[in-house]
Amino acid sequence: MEFEYLIIFLPLIGSIISGFFGKILGSRNSEILTSLFVSISTIISFIIFYKVFNEDYTNNLDIVTWISSGTFNVNWSIKIDALSSVMLVVVTLVSSIVHIYSIGYMSHDPHKQRFMSYLSLFTFSMLMLVTSDNFLQLFFGWEGVGLCSYFLIGFWFKKESANAAAIKAFVVNRVGDFGFALGIFLIFYLFGTVNYNEVFELVPLTLDKYFSFLGLNINAIDLICILLFIGAMGKSAQLFLHTWLPDAMEGPTPVSALIHAATMVTAGVFLVVRCSPIYEYSPFVLNVITIIGMSTAFFAATVALAQDDIKKIIAYSTCSQLGYMFFAAGVGAYNVAMFHLFTHAFFKALLFLGSGSVIHSFKDEQNIKLMGGVWKKLPYTWILMIIGTLALTGFPFLSGFYSKDAIIEFAYLRGNTTGYFAAGIGIFTALLTSIYSWRLIFKTFHGNYNNKKLNISDMHESPMVMIIPLIILAIGAIFCGFLFKDLFIGIESSNSFWKNSIFFLEPLSRNHPPLWFILITPILVILSIPVAYYIFIKNTKITNDIVNGNLPLYNFLKNKWYFDELYEYLFVNPSKKIGLYFWKKIDLRFIDRFGPDGVSSLIKSISLLAVKFQNGFIYHYAFIMLLGFSALLTFLILK
Amino acid sequence: MNFPILSSLILLPLLGALFIFFSKSKSNTNLTSKYLALFVSFSNFILSLYLWYLFDPSTSEFQFLEEQSWIKGFVNYKVGIDGISILFIILTTFITPLCVVSVNNTIKNRLKDFLVAILVMESLMIGVFCSLDLVVFYLFFEGGLIPMFLIIGIWGGERRVYSAFKFFLYTLLGSVLMLVAIISIYWVTGTTDVTYLYSLGIDEKYQYLLWLAFFSSFAVKTPMWPVHTWLPDAHVEAPTAGSVLLAAILLKMAGYGFIRFSIGLFPIASEYFIPLIYILSLVAIIYTSYVALMQEDMKKLIAYSSVAHMGFVTLGIFTFTQQGLEGSIYQMISHGLVSAALFLSVGVIYDRMHTRLISNYGGLVSIMPKYSIVLMVFTLGAIGLPGTSGFVGEFLILIGTFQKSFLVAAIASIGVILSAAYMLWLYKRVIFGAIQKNEIRKMDDLNKSEIFVLSSLVFPIILFGFYPEPLLSTTEVSIENLIDMYKSNLKPNLIKN
């Protein structure tokens, strides 16, 4: 029995037991059981991660045949290499922390077993996704996590908004999956296989294949890259397909931390990194990725500035950080993208769970304008949130500092226009990130207490079962950047750690950007803290003046650049109209009217006509007989 | 000669039906008739599993052949199966007992006659899938109309007469042309024996018209756009068991017919008419998905989604690729399970609330948790989520289609987005949300027989999503052979008559 099976199937078993036998077990036992199973998974994942970087351990297990038809063959598989081992650690660690945290957070909910079952099922799907050795199982995990996300967003099923958000998430993701699926079809068409290793080997031999589509001649490799990237954009909430992520905050907060911050939304980044052997041959698409990535980073950061919902701010922040990861991948620094994914998992999960603790204390209030001044009441949460914020904004020597600054540096070192441009946007976005993050902290914990429903003396800190998981994440948020930077993005990392799991057509630049460039971001980030404190707490008149002076801009940001309204106008309403038109006008008015109903009414009118001849007057019959007889006679004579 | 297992499969339900029909009609015999029907149909299912066990998937030859002279020199009663037909037979024998169990609550009057109709239907359907003579096929194929017509016309809802006639009119129109085509095949070749015709080939000049004649019959039954409008009406008016038989089995006769006869007998015409099929299939997928989105009646919504799903099937068949054809058969089996399950699920709440309007429901999850879980599985199956049987079929079809045309595959894939939209929206409006009506609070969760019926559908839908191998390996060799035969027939060295 290989260890790997345990990692993947323990969460599944936990999910099944809690889902189907939860009533018998009771809620507490289900919680303990699922948390325990995922924790065991985590421990084994760490062992495997250790073996990978210490002993060069790799493995590729075939479990059983999945689909086999003609030349199309796919197995259920478990692939362990550097890339998947990193993802294993991230997924299982955050998942187990969220499982434990949920015991506290969901303590008043009547459907705890169902919740834990979904969480474990999600973990299983995510693990299937990252350990796949082929595109189809990846797609299975991809859809599986999407499904669990759907369940969990709509977990509070009585809320109309939660249901709508759940469907929106699923359908928008399906738009991405549409591209992804076409990408898989094209891969099979070109290479005759969907197995990573076989595909990656064939890519360099297939560079000059062209594919004509609607009169355009497109390079086949470029087309594959674009199609796969459309899938990645859906799952990772990149610009144009991002609208589902903020709405997904309707789900319980632990879900937001696990799915919509640390794991599922990073699947798109993982996909691009996993496919680096294809992407490296498509500089055009890499540029597209850079542009989409930096646009998303910038767009989401601007929107986050104007939001008042604590979770929506963090959601847009996630969207923005995912943008960073993509532009890292776009400039060819896949390992840096993975590093940011890794550190981001810690501090973003920390921020989400921290905000969950705040929401829990405020009895489900999420508007930061109705909070404030509670830092003394929620000391642990306050400190932990500050650690998360420091790490996110890239405060020197915390984890975000190493990963985010590396992204900006590699963008600069790329040396082309997109690279410089991306670096510039990256720095500016880092400043915006810092401002909205500190706005969140100051509005939530400092200034005056603004909540009228609750008395400040009723505020109290969350239970330990919620705080301890946060502490673990905080430790990660502080140290993992410093500890793992050499392993992930050190000069020798591509040879010593990543090896075959990430492919670099040309080795990454070993130069360093000029010192002034390295210093810009940290200086801006540090300076923004007192500035934010001044404008959001000390002298709020300034912010009010800025808002009132630029009301159209403020509304534009507040309404998220009007994407939802635009899509409603472009896609949702027309779809309904088209549906009604096809049904009422074409099916009923046209096909039925001239088809079956037409035929039957025609027969009816003909028979009504025929009936008129049968009127019972003998001379009518005689006359018709005579007519017939003479017609027959004429015919015979003429013949 | 060995034990005539295929004839037994055909005759057993018929004998059961006769027995029930002639048993004395008393109120207490209703229950006995039901048990008898259940016993007969279940034995038939076991027998068909035994057939599958005996079946040799490594050859594409027809197996379990039986031949009896019927009309001398003209028609032979000839039956036999290969990897293409066997799965449909098992689907039929599997769905029928479930229908019998489900009639409990739905059919209040003349239960006995209803059971007779179901069993006769089963016989005829099995006959369709194993007949190897065109005339015999035609008789079974059209015979199937009669019990269905009666089921809708007698036990249907308010507009049952209109629906039954619409159903009859449409399907008869196509069939008449097919009959003419069969007669002309006999004139041209002197035989109606399918295996013999395969080896003989039909002259190219006749193929186009003959293909169109068969097509007109199959297109109506599939149903393809624009001759699909009978299906929503028929489904809405039919009682639950009728809808199940209609969706799960009756619609599959046409897909099977395309594979067995259109491709097998008229390969050149099939190649020629590819654009027609692709266009109609794409319209079916996109158009009916949009229509399904706006339906207010649950059964109509599922009926329209059936049209979209069958659009994938016709698309896959006419790719003439291994993946496309295997995918089509898989999709038909999967759709048989999923649509049966969905119609049964609608039946469950219809029995309690006596309405099919979506807007009358909402919030069922807290009243009927078990129901909500199984319906979720079926919904996901209809969406084609990986891990359900729906995915495997759809995916293989699209992979096959892609090898023919990027554009066609791309448009068909849009259907995958739309199916998620209309199914999840349906599920949300029925299951989630706050409870609007007080009557809903009085609804009971699934009873034992409903749990039995629905969970026996949940199981294969999930199993064949994760492990489709048993089905795929059954069809593989026969499909390979069909494609080889098709390709060699495309070459101009046809035997001229």
Image (tube, coloured by chain):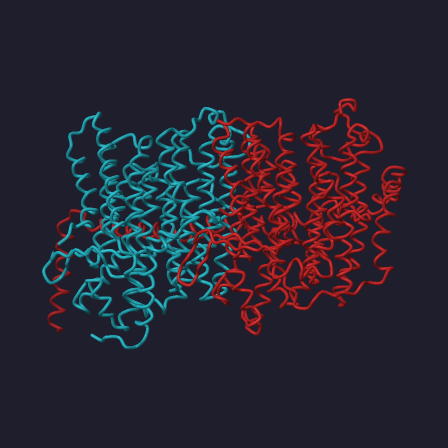
Q: Colour of chain A?
A: red
As drawn, B451 above or below B203: above
Quadrant housing the C terminus of chain A:
bottom left
Image coordinates for residue A78, horizontal then vertical, percent = 52, 52
Of all residues shown, which one is farthest toward the left? B72
Residue at 55% in and 67% down: A201
Q: Is residue B210 left or right of residue A155?
A: left
Q: Could you tell me residue A280's position as x and y percent?
A: 64, 66
- Most foreground residue, A593 or B394: B394
Residue drawn at (60%, 53%), measured in percent from left and top?
A84
- In the rendered structure, the colour chosen for chain B is cyan
- Using the image as rendered, state which of residue B88 and residue A83 is in the foreground: A83
Position above or below: A324 against B453:
below
Q: Is residue A488 left or right of residue B293?
A: right
Q: Which residue of the protein is positioned furthest toward the bottom in this rendering? A: B493
Say whether residue A42 is left or right of residue A508.
Answer: left
Number of disc labels: 0
In the image as oriented, which residue stretches furthest toward the front?
A55
Q: Nearer the viewer, residue A271 or B352?
A: A271
Residue at 34% x, 36% y is B157
The picture quadrant where one finds residue B448 is top left
Where in the figure is residue A182, as x and y percent of width and height? 52, 60
Q: Position of residue B447 (x, y in %)?
A: 38, 28
Q: Is residue A448 left or right of residue A318?
A: right
* B440 or B84: nearer the viewer: B84
